[in-house]
Each structure stands twice: as structure tokens, then as C-alpha cells.
Image (tube, rainbow, N blue to C red):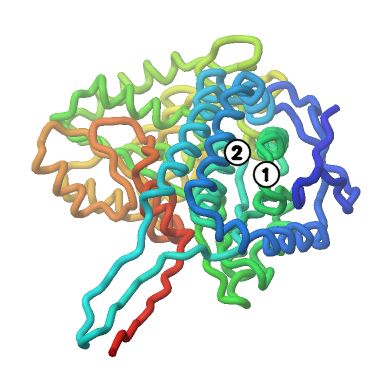
Amino acid sequence: MIEIKNYINGKFLENTNSEEVPVLNPATEEQIASTYKGSIDDVKKAIEAAEEAQKEWEERPAIERAAYLKKIAEGIRKRSEEITEVIMQEGGKTYDLANTEAFFTADYIEYMAEWARRYEGEILQSDKRNEHILLYKKALGVTTGILPWNFPFFLIARKAAPALITGNTIVVKPSEETPINAKIFAEIVHECELPEGVFNLINGSGSIVGNELAANEKVALVSLTGSETAGKKVMEAASNNLTKVNLELGGKAPAIVLEDADLDNAVQYIIESRIINTGQVCNCAERVYVQKSIEKKFIEKLTEKMSEVTYGDTAKEKVGMGPLINKKAQENVHRFVEGAISEGGKLECGGEVPEQQGFFYPATVISNCNNDMEIIKEEVFGPVMPVVGFETFDEAIALANDCKYGLTSSIYTKDLQKAFKAVDQLEFGETYINRENFEAIQGFHAGIKNSGIGGADGKHGLEEYLRTHIVYMNIDD
């Protein structure tokens, strides 16, 4: 049985809260590890270690900090198969997706390391003689990262890499569902001899560990990827100290299919954007709006392809999907399906809880939906695709925007004018045109409305971890 420990100030330490939390393989329901609830004292020790290490870390040239990040990326690649297997066991991912996550994490860290010689301040023009105005970009200080379970390994890097390259230190809390991969990340950090206190890892619950990470007065930035509810709790905890927050929360991504779209491509990309990680991705396509002139044909094609999606234990067979993360998730997805059918939706395929070990759910299509249904309003986080018909382009945009979330969106059309009109009018942080929903390292992954505050990736994601210091320098003789 794997035992999970904290990593504080360069050492692996026992958790002082001995209340055990079992870690289950969602495909077999077998316990594969034990973690612990975590204590406020452990969190404070980690934050204090990060605070003590931060100034010296920031004083190092950025290129030296980059060298450590590159070593971490190299360490990840060396242990990529082990990491892949752990991600499959903890989260139920397919081999291809878990392996992609391992290598994508290494690529991401290297990408952020390359900003060492590139992020910069500014020299501004002054209104006075003999005065220079200098704008510096400096580290924030101690940062924290509170992680979900759906992309647990990559999201360590998404929080830590931009923090470390810009001179910050960090304390990370992995999900209680998926702590083993974080243990490996900490081991790699340790092997790379990163200075003590620069990277710290604390296991435990959101209510104890997460709350202290957000509420502690020594923290300069708290970054959370999680639910809307969790985001509001983090904001509340951070508000007492006016701590900066960075929140990636829920999504309810619309996919709009116009009558001129390549239907085969649209169906394929929408399915890829729905079943990835068994639908447990916040930028997944969560609802489809299809023009009524092609609605019947589209539903036939979508249903046929979704019916062919296989599921099972990804460690034993090559399948299209693994399990949902836990029993509660399985029950929640099925509740959405039953609710949609009771409200008038038509079940085209799937929709039944399998009678087998593991938290599986089949790829499901529900037609005859409308925007008043709960399945259209709320995030399902499972492999279920509700379909809504529309008459005009303007109606489709209005339906897509009629949502409290604003993370990702997509449109399928050959009409360039309508594609750009959609970009102008869709109220989302990201729009994908004639392709699957998946962001790029150099982009900016950010939502609006209830989908969060701030963002990640690329130049703009890096700048989330920087503050400005303006200097007015008079050089009179």
C-alpha cells in the first residue's frame, strides 16, 4: 500500500493529522494508497518554509531558475511510464491520455523555463526633464496552488512552473482523489536538488488545507482549479487579507453546428471534446446547438458514433473511455440524464448505469432538449451530450450565451463571416472554430462570468505571477 507524505522544506514528512483517506482505483474500486486529512500546522510550516526561501530564490538570475525547471522536465520524461500508469490507476484515464499528460507536463515546464530571458519591464516616457520612469516586473512572493483530480499531474506544472520561473515559491495541495502522481512530482523535484522551501506539497482536504492556503496572511496569490463552489470559498477565505486569486472554475461549453458545416468533422470533433477523460474536463463540449435543417441527420451521425465509444478498465483493455472518478460522480451524471428525460428529452443512446465493478457510464446522447433544462444549465462532468435545435444564427448565439459560465465555446461552419461574427458575440474566454476543444501552451486559458478570474498559459499566464513596481528617477545635475 502506497503511503502519501507531505513535502516541506526539502523533506518528506509524516502528516500530523492521522485521519486516513483511502485512495481508490475508480475502475476496480480497490484501495491503492492512503493519504491523510492534513492539518493547519502542516500548512503553516510549508508556507513559512516557502516564505523563508523566496527572497534568495528571487535574487537568483532567472536563467538559473530556468535550469532547475529544465531538470524537472527531464526527470518527468525519465519516469514517464511510471507516471502514466499512476495517472491511469488514480483517475481511470486511457493510456494515450495519461501518457500525453505526462509528456505535456514536461513540455509545459520547459516552455515556462524559456521565459527566463524574455519576460521584461518597461521604460516609459516622462513629462519632466531629466526624469526616467522605470516599470519593473517582480515576483509576488509565496504562492499556493489548489488542484483538482481530472488533470492532476499537469496542473501541478500549470501552477508551479510560472510561479518558480518568475521568482516566487509555492505550496501545492493535490486532490485527495489523486495524490500519488503529486508524490512522484515531489520526488523528481527533490532529486533535482531544488533549493529547500521553493516547492512544497501538502496533502489534505479543501476545508482544512485548502482554506488555510487561501486564508494565510503570508500568501500573495492563491490559485485554484476546481468547482464554482470551491472558487467562492477560496475568494471568501482570501478576502480577509485581500489576497490575489486566480480561479479556473466550471464550464458549460456550447458547440454550435451551422447547416453549412462539414457534419462528419463536426461530429468527430464534438465527440472528442465530450468523451475526453470520460467527459470530466471543464473545457469539454457540454451542449450542442444544431441548425434544424440538419438536426435529424446530425443526431443520427452523433448517436451512431457515440454508440461505438467503448469503456472499461483502461489498464486491462484498449477502450475509448475509462470510469468516472467516484461513485458520487456516477450517481450525479445519471441524475442529470434521468432529469432530462423527465423534462421531455429523448434518449438516443446510453443512459444506463452499467452493472459491473467500477464507476463507469456509457457515452450518452439526449435530443429534444431546451435551454430551460437543468442538463443544459449545469455542468454535467460526464460523457453525456444534450442536443438543442435552432433556426437562425442569431438564435444560436443567444442560446449559447444564455449561461452563467463562460470558459470555452466552439462553432462549426464554412462561412468565415459567421465564424468571425461568432467570435465577436460569444461570451466566452475561448472559442474553437472547426476543431476540438483543447488549448495550447502558448495561448491563454481563461474564462469569464462564473468560470473564474485570471487565467493560465502563455505570456499572460506568466504575468499572473508578477507584480509591477514603478520607479520615478530624477537625475538633475
Residue at 47% over, 28% down: 276
Quick one: 55 or 253, which is closer to the camera?
A: 55
SS at circle 1:
loop
Question: Residue 437's mark?
Answer: none
Residue at 34% over, 23% down: 302
Residue 249 vs residue 367: left or right? right
Q: Vertical placement of 408 versus 58: above or below?
A: above
Q: Where, by quadrant of the figure, is residue 185 drawn?
A: top right
Quick one: 273 or 102, which is closer to the camera?
A: 102
Q: Position of residue 314 (x, y in %)?
A: 61, 17
Report the amino acid beneath label 2: Pro
Of all residues shown, which one is farthest toward the front?
Answer: 477
Residue at 28% over, 30% down: 435
- Tell me the quarter of the image containing the C terminus: bottom left
Residues at discs 2 and 1 in contact (Cβ within 8 Å):
yes
Of all residues shown, which one is farthest toward the top?
Answer: 317
Q: Position of residue 119 (x, y in %)?
A: 38, 54
Q: Which residue is mark 2?
A: 152
Residue at 42% over, 37% down: 284
SS at circle 2:
helix
Report the amino acid beneath label 1: Ser
Residue 15 vs residue 389: left or right? right
Question: Residue 175's mark?
Answer: 1
Quick one: 320 or 125, which is closer to the camera?
A: 125
